[in-house]
Each structure stands twice: as C-alpha cells, then as structure tokens.
Image: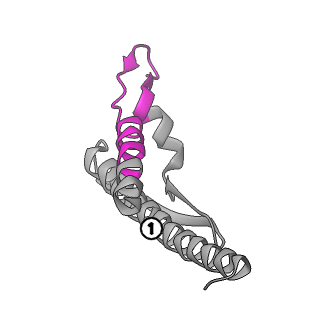
C-alpha cells in the first residue's frame, strides 16, 4: 500500500519530468522558429547586391532553465530595414515603395512557434 506522502512525491516527480520535457520542447521550437524567420526574411528581402539579405542573423539574448529568447536582426544593415520595409522619400522628391519582408516573416514565425509547441506537448 502506498502512503499519501509517497503518492505526493511521485506526483511531484512526474510533474517535474513533464516540466523538463516542456522546457526542452519549447526551446527547440524557439530555435527552429528563429531560424525559419531569418531564412524567410533573407529570401524575401529586396536584393540589389544581396548584402542586406545576407546580413540577417539570429542571436540568443537570454536563456535559463525555463526560458529562451532569440532575436532575429540585421547585423550590419539594420539602418536599411525600416526604410526597405516601409518605403522612404527620395532625395529629389517622390517616394520609394516599401517591400514588406519582415512583418510577414514575423507573423509566420508566431504561427509556426505556436504549432510547434502544440505538436511537441500533445
């Protein structure tokens, strides 16, 4: 016969194991999503010389036992990101139309992250 104290310990042990699995699954999903977003931005970015598209990288911001934060950014062409995404004024008048490539990748990344986490935890 199992005592209540033993049963409580077993339940806590099971919950701790699930927490560790959930943390691992979440971090794996975050890494995969960040890579996917970076790839999508690079593929859809305006290409003149290709330097801007190649400048996109992922960077781990923080990580601890229960969370992971990764950012996707342009390492040396960040000044262009806003101008290319939203358009800008020309020197002698007129405007250059924007080419949305960051916002769609961000939206797709949010959907991908949600689906990956649901898949891993079900």
Q: Position of residue 70 (x, y in %)?
A: 54, 60
Nearer to us in this view, 18 or 108: 18
Q: Quadrant of the N terminus?
A: bottom right
Q: Is residue 35 left or right of residue 4?
A: left
Give the answer, above or below, for where 108 lies relative to 54: above
The residue sitting at 45% across, 62% down in the picture is 57
Q: Look at the image and tell me whether residue 55 can be seen.
A: no
Q: Is residue 98 magenta?
A: yes
Q: Is residue 95 magenta?
A: yes
Q: Is residue 60 left or right of residue 120?
A: right
Name the residue furthest top: 94
Name the residue furthest bottom: 1
Q: Position of residue 62 (x, y in %)?
A: 65, 66
Nearer to us in this view, 34 or 122: 122
The residue sitting at 44% across, 17% down in the picture is 92
Q: Image quarter for residue 4? A: bottom right
Q: Image quarter for residue 23? A: bottom right
The residue sitting at 36% across, 56% down in the picture is 116
The residue sitting at 41% across, 56% down in the picture is 117
Magenta residues, start to end: 84-113
Residue beneath label 1, please? 25
Q: Look at the image and tell me whether residue 80 can be seen.
A: yes
Q: Is residue 20 left or right of residue 25?
A: right
Q: Position of residue 55 (x, y in %)?
A: 41, 58
Of helix, strand and loop, which one carries label 1?
helix
Q: Is residue 41 left or right of residue 78?
A: left
Give the answer, above or below, for where 78 lies relative to 17: above
Nearer to us in this view, 97 or 18: 18
The colour scheme used to paint the residues is one colour
Give the answer, above or below, for where 50 lies relative to 60: above
């Amino acid at each position: 016969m199992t005592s209540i104290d033993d049963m409580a310990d077993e339940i806590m042990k099971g919950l701790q194991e699930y927490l560790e699995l959930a943390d691992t699954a979440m971090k794996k999903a975050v890494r995969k999503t960040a890579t996917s977003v970076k790839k999508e931005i690079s593929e859809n970015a305006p290409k003149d010389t290709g330097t801007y598209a190649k400048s996109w990288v992922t960077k781990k911001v923080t990580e601890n036992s229960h969370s992971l934060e990764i950012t996707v950014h342009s390492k040396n062409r960040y000044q262009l990101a806003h101008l290319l995404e939203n358009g800008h004024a020309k020197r002698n008048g007129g405007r250059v139309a924007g080419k949305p490539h960051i916002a769609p990748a961000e939206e797709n990344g949010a959907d991908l992250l949600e689906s990956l986490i649901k898949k891993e935890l079900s």
